Every structure is written in structure tokens, then in C-alpha cells.
């Protein structure tokens, strides 16, 4: 269920069945010359649409948090960035509102790598201070096996992300501007102008191999995997052995 579509009365009634709130966290950021600035918002949306079809009234899906931590690609036009501590506090308080009133499980559906630290901070506080169960998802990282069963490679605005953006709205992706960047960091070091140097043309990987069909299949595979994990989470099953 989409939280924002419900009335207050509808929500109170739905809370009798649903104990899990999914909060998508995106970014407004350059994605090559071919993908829209909202790609990190749109990709989680594609996956969550499929998840909503699979899980229906057992989950709530919140509106996406649009702005994220984008210090690397802030060098490119259209990119916005906020500090990790600010985003972390925002996410904590937003989620806590629902945990305080009956939600048991919080799922942060992350669409952008720069948000990872902020989401981790929010999750730690929700567990320690609100007693929530928290599941942090970075779709391109946690479901790499599913993605690589469809694509040859991954990257920022690369084959996988561009494909999922096309599944969101093919008309928004300008494939005639798609390009390739195979630069990879030797180790996790930060330095001035890293974004422009490492992410040349605001891309990594090979966007020219992307397709809507690949994006649809990636979203279906990831949604199915998340659905199976959430069913275990709802039962309080967090480990094996």
C-alpha cells in the first residue's frame, strides 16, 4: 500500500494487518548525459511497484525522500547534496513517528550509494532508541547476483541502472547520449575533484548495453527476493543455523 494515498482512517485500519514501513531514499544527481537527475528516486520506485503487487496490504510504502548525500557528483550541473548527519537525523525522526504508533519494521530502500552512512546512522538510532527492527537495502549492491544474471556489468548510470531507469520511463532516458567509462578506484580514497576524475561524464560502466527489458527483469528479480526476505522478517526469522 502506498502510504500517501491513504486517509488517516484508512491508515489506522490498515495498521491492523501491516507492520512494515518502507522508506525509499534517493538523490537528485547527475547520471551521465543520458539519464535523468531523478534516477536514484526512480529506480527504487520501479522495484517497489513490483513489491507492492507481491505483498499488497501487508506493507506500507512511504513517499521517497528525494535529496541525498552527493558530494562526489556535486561537481555536475543539477546535483544537490546534504550532509550525512543531517539526512540521518531526518530519516530517524521521520521513521520514529511511525514506530511510536505501531509500526514494527522499518525498511530503508536506498537508491544512492552516498546515502549509506546516513541510513546506517538512522537505523542504529531506531533500534536503540525506538525498539524498531530495521532492514537497510541498497538495491544495486545487495542484489548484485540477481542483477548480474541479467546484465554484463554494473555502474553509476551504467548498464544496470540505466536499464532500470528505462523501466521507469523509457522516454526520459536519452540513449543516443549513452557512453562508457571503465575507470575504477584502486582503493577507497577521497580527494579533490574525485567526482569529475573518477566519474568522467558522471558515469561508470557501459550504459550503451542498457534496455528496458533488462530493467523490467532486474526489478522483478529483486522484488521477488525482497518479498521473501520481508516475509521472514515479519515472522522474526533473521538468521539460520
Image (cartoon, grey):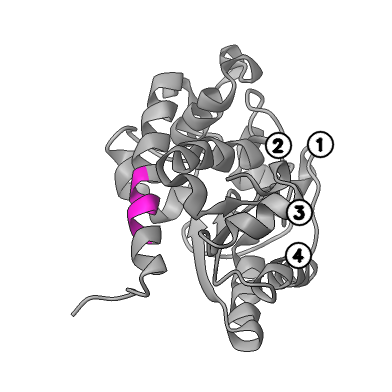
Secondary structure mostly seen in the magenta stretch: helix
Residue 70 coordinates in the image, percent (x, y) = 72, 52
Determine the secondary structure under disc 2: loop
Residue on which disc 3 sits:
8
Would residue 226 be counted in the magenta stretch?
A: yes
Residue 2 coordinates in the image, percent (x, y) = 63, 44
Left or right position of 191 against 14: right
Disc nearer the start of the sequence (3/4): 3
Residue furthest to the left in view is 241
Residue on which disc 2 sits:
30
Left or right position of 70 against 154: right
Disc nearer the start of the sequence (2/3): 3
Residue on which disc 1 sits:
78
Q: Residues within 10 Å of mark 2 (few under 14, many from 20)?
A: many
Disc nearer the start of the sequence (2/1): 2
Residue shown at the point (58%, 65%) measured from the top left: 189
Left or right position of 74 against 52: right
Q: Which mark is residue 87?
A: 4
Residue shown at the point (36%, 70%) measured from the top left: 235
Amino acid at each position: 500500500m502506498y502510504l500517501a494515498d491513504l486517509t488517516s482512517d484508512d491508515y489506522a485500519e490498515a495498521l491492523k494487518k501491516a507492520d512494515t514501513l518502507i522508506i525509499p531514499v534517493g538523490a537528485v544527481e547527475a547520471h551521465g548525459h543520458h539519464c535523468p537527475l531523478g534516477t536514484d528516486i526512480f529506480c527504487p520506485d520501479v522495484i517497489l511497484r513490483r513489491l507492492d503487487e507481491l505483498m499488497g496490504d501487508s506493507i506500507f510504502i512511504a513517499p521517497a525522500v528525494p535529496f541525498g548525500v552527493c558530494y562526489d557528483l556535486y561537481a555536475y550541473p543539477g546535483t544537490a547534496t546534504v550532509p550525512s548527519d543531517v539526512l540521518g537525523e531526518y530519516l530517524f525522526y521521520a521513521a520514529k513517528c511511525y514506530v511510536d504508533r505501531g509500526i514494527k519494521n522499518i525498511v530503508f530502500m536506498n537508491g544512492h550509494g552516498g546515502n549509506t552512512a546516513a541510513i546506517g546512522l538512522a537505523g542504529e538510532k531506531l533500534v536503540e532508541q525506538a525498539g524498531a527492527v530495521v532492514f537497510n537495502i541498497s538495491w544495486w549492491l545487495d542484489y548484485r547476483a540477481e542483477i548480474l544474471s541479467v546484465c554484463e556489468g554494473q555502474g553509476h548510470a551504467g548498464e544496470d541502472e540505466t536499464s532500470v531507469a528505462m523501466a521507469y520511463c523509457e522516454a526520459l532516458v536519452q540513449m543516443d547520449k549513452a557512453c562508457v567509462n571503465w575507470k575504477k578506484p584502486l582503493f577507497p580514497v577521497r580527494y579533490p575533484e574525485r567526482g569529475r576524475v573518477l566519474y568522467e561524464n558522471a558515469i561508470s560502466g557501459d550504459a550503451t548495453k542498457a534496455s528496458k527489458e533488462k530493467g523490467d527483469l532486474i526489478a522483478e528479480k529483486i522484488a521477488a527476493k525482497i518479498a521473501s526476505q520481508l516475509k521472514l522478517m515479519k515472522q522474526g526469522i533473521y538468521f539460520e543455523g
